[in-house]
Amino acid sequence: MTQSEEILEQGLIKTLTEMSYEYVSIKEEENLLANFKVQLEKHNHKELAAHGREHFTDKEFDKILLYLEGGTRFEKAKKLRDLKNFQLENGERVWIEFINKQHWCQNEFQVSNQITVEGRKKCRYDVTILINGLPLVQIELKKRGVELKQAYNQIQRYHKTSFHGLFDYIQLFVISNGVNTRYFANNPNSGYKFTFNWTDAENVPFNDLSKFAYFFFDKCNLGKMISKYIVLHEGDKCLMVLRPYQFYAVEQILDRVQNSNKNGYIWHTTGAGKTLTSFKAAQLVSEIDGIDKVMFVVDRHDLDTQTQSEYEAFEPGAVDNTDNTKELIKRLRSDSKIIITTIQKLNVAVTREYYNKRLQGVRDQKVVMIFDECHRSHFGECHKNIVKFFNNLQIFGFTGTPIFAENAKQEHTTAEVFGDCLHKYLIKDAIADENVLGFLVEYYKGQQNIDLFSEKRMTEIAQFILNNFNKSTFDGEFNALFAIQSVSVPMLLKYYKIFKSLNPKIKIGAVFTYAANESQDDAQTGMNQGFADDKVTSDELQAIMDDYNEMFNTAFTTENFSAYYDDINLRMKKKKPDMEPLDLLTAAGIQSYQPCAEREETLWQGGMFP
């Protein structure tokens, strides 16, 4: 059944007014400004009353508009969230609040439609949600049967032709044709792939506009989304908004911290934006009264730099760099609330008397730890030492592959170490949402009755991969990660040598954590960060690096292993057009090269592994 835009529009407005939104008729920008003045005064009535006032004078309001007019879209998003110290005409100063971030339900919510704006072209916008008089959510509708992307493209045209003034304060867009509804942040450069369905906590999408509106536009939910779940990405100077599964995961962690001392873990598939989710969880937990420290703990030295840079892009200065244990001790004793470190350094800090005697004042503080990839190093002595040291500790883990009783090689399962699973977003959900690439499965049996790990069998596997590489990677559109099931560096080296012996026409590299490059503190933990053992020498790693140097005209050695690792990272991600990519990366264990595995550019060859 065809349903016109007008019917959709009127139905949405009816739904919103039934949800206690005030309908306000705004035909043009002059009406918009007049309404904004009234709503701003209403929202700040207590502050004005403290100075014997109910209203701003016209001159005062013009100064407020002048303040709001300046800056980029990104800078305006900051202004929206900041208090403004403002001087009244009589010389007194007041604090003006544009949105209440802490008590997000306590804002003024209105809805209007068909607001006409004069820009390079005259445009009329379908439905606008105003919070405290500012247009913060814009909804564009298309009649049923029309492709949703047309509504998205129309918003992009508005960016070029008409959005200005208070409309630069839009935080979220919603597009709908009645049967399919999506939302996205005000970031015109992100593209249609960054539009999202809203879902329930079980990842069931709310596509229908009326159902979407009932949940997403609930005043408290919308206020919370804008106040807490839009991220101002300092690296790209743009706005990002969390997807629903990220929102629910963070909400579950916050609920645990605020209402119990229980732990928990988040099961989100690889590639689901774990860094953004964990950052937002850490940031919001750090804002809770009574929380002294939030620590983000990674289990490999290799990820320290990358995770640090990603956190810094979300909020510079929120994370302290902990290059060594002494620096970690300093940060723990300071006023820093969010700290990133490795499990190895943290273990040294709590077990060595030289360090832990300086942490006695910290061990009784309320500390929340968020563990990255909690299926790996959190079943041994390091984890036990850390948990035992802190007396008022809550721990939360993120993992794409939790350990259950049926697949446990360790003594404990993920649930035994971290407690309840608080939220799930599995690979089937990610594929359905088109958030990650689907799997390409190719089976190879080869000759029968051959030992799976014999050189003959391994050569067959390597030859099969090389023979099918162009077809499987769509003629090099993707690159590939080859991971063996055995977490054995000697096995990786054997495969690498076999690949090279077959004179491949593609560029092949190898990576594994090199134990000799661990810091002195990490070495004293007795914990091997990677998969190297006594049988693996620096000469063998250097031989791999020599091949790599010859391919790409680089000069890496075992002395600058981290730089080698970072270079592989960049070539696998294909983020720099002037950087020749690596076609196939061999790694010991499917998790041994996580940064590559989290990227869309990686092609997973599910059936190639022995």
Image (cartoon, rainbow, N blue to C red):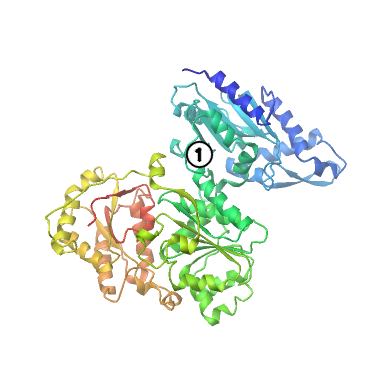
Q: Tell me the residue at 57%/46% (across/down).
A: 229
* Residue 315 visible (yes or no): no
198, above or below 556, in the image: above
Total numbered labels: 1
Q: Nearer the viewer, residue 334 or 13?
A: 13
Residue assigned mark 1: 199
Answer with the quarter of the image where residue 35 lies.
top right
Of the 4 image quadrants, the one containing the C terminus is: bottom left
Answer with the quarter of the image where residue 49 lies.
top right
Tell me where residue 381 appears, x and y as whole percent. 45, 73
Tell me where residue 305 appears, x and y as whole percent. 45, 62
* Residue 35 visible (yes or no): yes
142, above or below 550, in the image: above
Q: Is residue 139 left or right of residue 275?
A: right
Q: Nearer the viewer, residue 603 or 124?
A: 603
Furthest toward the front, the residue is 405
Badge 1 crowding class, 10 Å Cα cut-off, few under 14, some 14 to 19, many 20 or more, is: some
Q: Tell me the residue at 67%/43% (across/down).
A: 104
Q: Nearer the viewer, residue 570 or 253?
A: 253
- Element marked by disc 1: loop
Furthest toward the bottom, the residue is 353
Tell me where residue 420 appears, x and y as whole percent. 50, 56
Q: Is residue 177 left or right of residue 65?
A: left
233, above or below 162, in the image: below
Q: Is residue 119 left or right of residue 99?
A: left
Tell me where residue 573 appears, x and y as whole percent. 36, 51
What's the amino acid at mark 1? Answer: Thr
